[in-house]
Amino acid sequence: MSNKTNYNDIKDIALVDFLDRDVEQTVPAHELWKDKPAVVIVIRRPGCQFCREEARIFHENRETIEQNMQGMNMFCIVHEKEGSDVFKNEFWKGKVYFDSEKAFYKALGGGQLRTGGWEQLIKPAFWGNFFRNKRSGVKGNFEGDGKILGGLLLVKANDGGIAYEHIEKVWGDIAHPDQVLEACSRVSGVALDKKAVAKAQQDHDALHDRMQQSSHSKGTNTSATDSNAAPTASAEAPATTTTGTVA
């Protein structure tokens, strides 16, 4: 199955390296995967608990992706700076770039920004995502614009194109780490240790305990969902399954 996102739409996007720097620096997107493939996570909102959950999951798999897969890189893209420092330092612990024109977000939508509003709250998939996040213990806030949907791309080195994509369709549709690891294995040519896939799921299951001990999670809103909404529910919705697209 072919990818929907066009590589030519992302390769020359101007990105700003702005965190932990005295002077901001603008770089073309293709520099991120120059010589090495890259996992690029397009974050909907730095304060979103779903986005923080996804960042923490992939941070837990950083050693497998960046070291075991022949030096792949991982980056996050944000369309607003607010809350990015906390997102990076507490959850992602890796490189974050600012996309001022929201060009990555438009590319994921075939040239149009994809957004989600209050209608998200009536979708069973959202509630599956919501309760999954509640179990994880990762918390968020209401700061910023959470309507613009994101996704994840695995881009081959140089101009090799997009090898895998995950498109967020409902708030909280985070990429499945086992699928991303398998895609990284195909691109790198490094056989994937099945234990690494199992560990990805185990780390996710154990995330709740670690986050409960985090000083950052204490005193943070526990019921925040997104786009400044805080729904409540008395029953758990069925978990959603999201399938990424492989080239």
Image: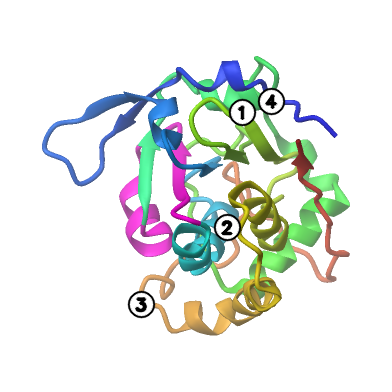
Range covered by the magenta-colored residues: 70-93
Q: Judge the density around disc 4: few (<14), some (14-19), many (≥20) Cα neighbours within 10 Å.
A: many
Color encoding of the figure = rainbow
Residue at x 83%, y 70% (from the top left corner): 236
Task: Tell me which corner region of the image, top left, top right, bottom left or bottom right, holds residue 119.
Answer: top right
Labels 2, 3: front one: 2
* Quarter of the view holding residue 92: bottom left
Mark nearer the N terminus (4 vs 2): 4
Give yes or no for contact between labels 2 and 3 (Cβ–Cβ under 8 Å): no
Residue to which mark 1 is pinned: 161
**Number of the label disc, if any, that sits on residue 5:** 4
Q: Pointers 1 and 2 in contact (CB under 8 A)?
A: no
Mark 3 to mark 1 CA distance (whole Å): 41 Å
Q: Are marks 4 and 2 in contact (CB under 8 Å)?
A: no
Mark 1 neighbour density, 10 Å: few (under 14) some (14–19) many (20 or more)? some
Depth check, front residue: 240 or 187 = 187
Number of residue marks: 4
- Which badge, 2 or 3, comes first in the chain's sequence? 2
13 left or right, relative to 178: left
Nearer to us in this view, 41 or 1: 1
CA–CA distance between discs 1 and 4?
10 Å
- Left or right, 93 with reference to 138: left
Residue 18: x and y in percent read 26, 36
**Between disc 1 and disc 2, whose residue precedes?**
2
Q: Amino acid at mark 1?
A: Gly
Would you name the residue on which mark 2 appears?
54
Q: Name the quadrant containing residue 112.
A: top right
